[in-house]
Amino acid sequence: MAERPSIAAEWAWSALAVTLAVGAMLAWPVNRTAIDWQPGLAWSQPWRAFSAVFVHYSALHLAANLAGAVLVGALGHAVPVPSRTALAWFVAWPLTQFGLAMQPDLLHYGGLSGVLHAGVMVVIVHLVFAGTTTQRRMGLAILAVLAAKVIHEAPWEMRLRRPEGWDIAVAPLAHGTGAIAGAICGMLVEWRHRWRNQSSNMAR
């Protein structure tokens, strides 16, 4: 049977989702180039890997990502996920932007979408590694949908796209790096949790 997180652990995930959403709203009037992701400044100003998620280039961009933050926050709270998954999501946050170094011609990047993909992947990993049979099936179903979306966007082509109905260009690579960062961080915390449980059982 899957573990039941404490109330505080359940809310850790939601608190991170709220932080992302509120930060994006507060940063809306801020000069974008002051805090967005710029590969040329990746190592001299590494904090941009955090601040870039708060940057949005249009009202539609902001609204869509705020809706996404609500959905990802609700997903983690509904499972519910333990606090270690919130830690994994937090670590995946800057890694998502650092992965964009593979596309040096992407001179500026901002937005929550990459980190939201990371959050969904962290939840998937938790469901598959630590969930009940039903939760594992749910995790695999969500994984299939997410994988289909990312593959359809072809992030390996490393070019910007302009989806119909959008008033900005989209960088599919960010969705790919977010999913990869989320998968890696999610697996690391789940493996660590499993190893600690095994060690504790052996010590008894």
Image: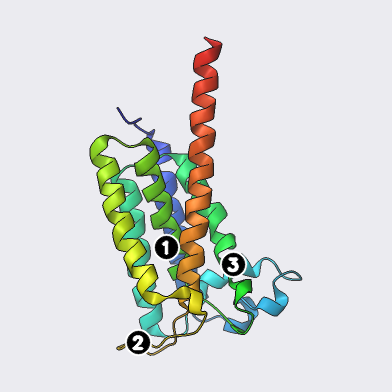
Is mark 3 in CB contact (under 8 Å) with mark 2? Answer: no
Mark 1 Cα-neighbour bin, 10 Å: few <14, some 14–19, many ≥20: many
| Closer to the camera in the image, 190 or 158 | 158
The disc, 3 or 2, on the residue closer to the chain's N-terminal end is 3
The disc, 1 or 3, on the residue closer to the chain's N-terminal end is 3
x 76%, y 71%: residue: 44
Mark 3 Cα-neighbour bin, 10 Å: few <14, some 14–19, many ≥20: some
Name the outermost residue toward the left.
Answer: 134
Q: Which residue is the site of mark 3? A: 99
Q: Which mark is residue 117?
A: 1
Mark nearest the camera among 1 and 3 is: 3
Q: Position of residue 121 (x, y in %)?
A: 41, 55
Secondary structure under tag 3 reads helix
Q: Amino acid at mark 3?
A: Gly
The disc, 2 or 1, on the residue closer to the chain's N-terminal end is 1
x 71%, y 79%: residue: 40
Mark 2 Cα-neighbour bin, 10 Å: few <14, some 14–19, many ≥20: few
| Closer to the camera in the image, 130 or 21 | 130
Q: Which residue is the site of mark 2? A: 166
Left or right position of 22 against 143? right
Name the outermost residue toward the right.
Answer: 44
Q: Amino acid at mark 2?
A: Trp
Left or right position of 41 against 136? right
